[in-house]
Image: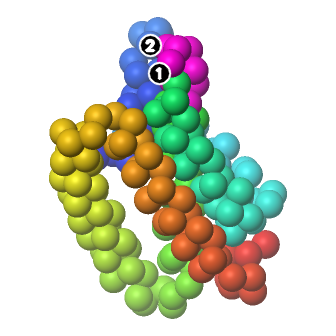
Amino acid sequence: PGSGKSPFARAIAGLLPAEFPGEWRGSLRVGELDIASAARAEAASRVGVRRLLASGLPFFAPAVWGLSFARTLGLAAALYLLQGLIAPVTNPLIDQWLLGQVPPARRGAVSSWRQVAADGSAMVGASLGGKILAGGGFDALFAVAGGVGLVGALGLIAGLRPGRRTDR
C-alpha cells in the first residue's frame, strides 16, 4: 500500500534543500512533528472533525471535473494541487471519525476493514479508470471520477451525524 500522501506532497518534499531540518517518512516531519498532521489536527481541534470533513470533501469533485475543462497548464496544475491536497487532509480525519464511533476494543477491526475497503476501491477504481480512459479519454475519466467522488462525499457527509463522540 502507498503512503497515502499525494504525488504533489512527495514532489514538494523532494524540492526541500538537503540542510532542511526535516525528513520524509511518508510525510514531511520536522523532529517528531508531522507537518501535515499538525495543521490538520489544529483545524480539527478548532472546528471539530465532522465539520472539517464536511467542509473539505465537497471540493474534490469540482476540482476533478475542472481538470476535464482545463485548457491551460496553470489551471490544470492549480486544480491538480487542489484535488491532491484533499486526500491527505481528509483520509486521517475519516479514520479518526470511524474509530471514534466504536469502543476501543473494536478499533483494530475497524481500522483493518477500512484499509481493506480503501485498497479494494483503489484496485477497482484503477481498473475501471483504465477502461474509461482507453474508451473515452481523459475528459470522460475526469467526469466519472468527479461523479464518484461527489457520491462518496455526499454519502460520508450524510453519515456524519451530530452528537457523535468526534463532534466538538
Taking 133 as reference, is 104 left or right? right
**Does the magenta portion include 74?**
yes
Determine the residue positioned at 50% across, 18% down.
71
Q: Is residue 1 visible?
A: no
Is the residue marked by circle 2 packed among few (<14), some (14-19), or many (20+) residues within 10 Å? Answer: few
* Image location (x, y in percent) of residue 84: 49, 37
Q: Is residue 133 visible?
A: yes
**Does the magenta portion include 29?**
no
Determine the residue positioned at 52% across, 14% down.
72
Is the residue marked by circle 1 packed among few (<14), some (14-19), or many (20+) residues within 10 Å? Answer: few
Determine the residue positioned at 60% across, 80% down.
159
Q: Mark 1 to mark 2: distance in Å?
A: 5 Å
Q: Which residue is mark 2?
A: 15
* Image location (x, y in percent) of residue 17: 47, 9
Tell whether label 2 touches label 1 (CB within 8 Å): yes
- Image quarter (top left, top right, bottom left or bottom right) of the C terminus: bottom right
| Residue segment shown in magenta | 71-79
Along the viewing direction, whichever of 38 and 118 lies nearer the viewer: 118
* Image location (x, y in percent) of residue 99: 50, 77
Identify whether 73 is placed above or below 59.
Answer: above
Residue type, numbered disc 2: Leu
Q: Kindly indicate the quadrant of the structure image that contains residue 58.
A: bottom right
Residue type, numbered disc 1: Ile
Q: For mark 2, give the secondary structure.
A: helix
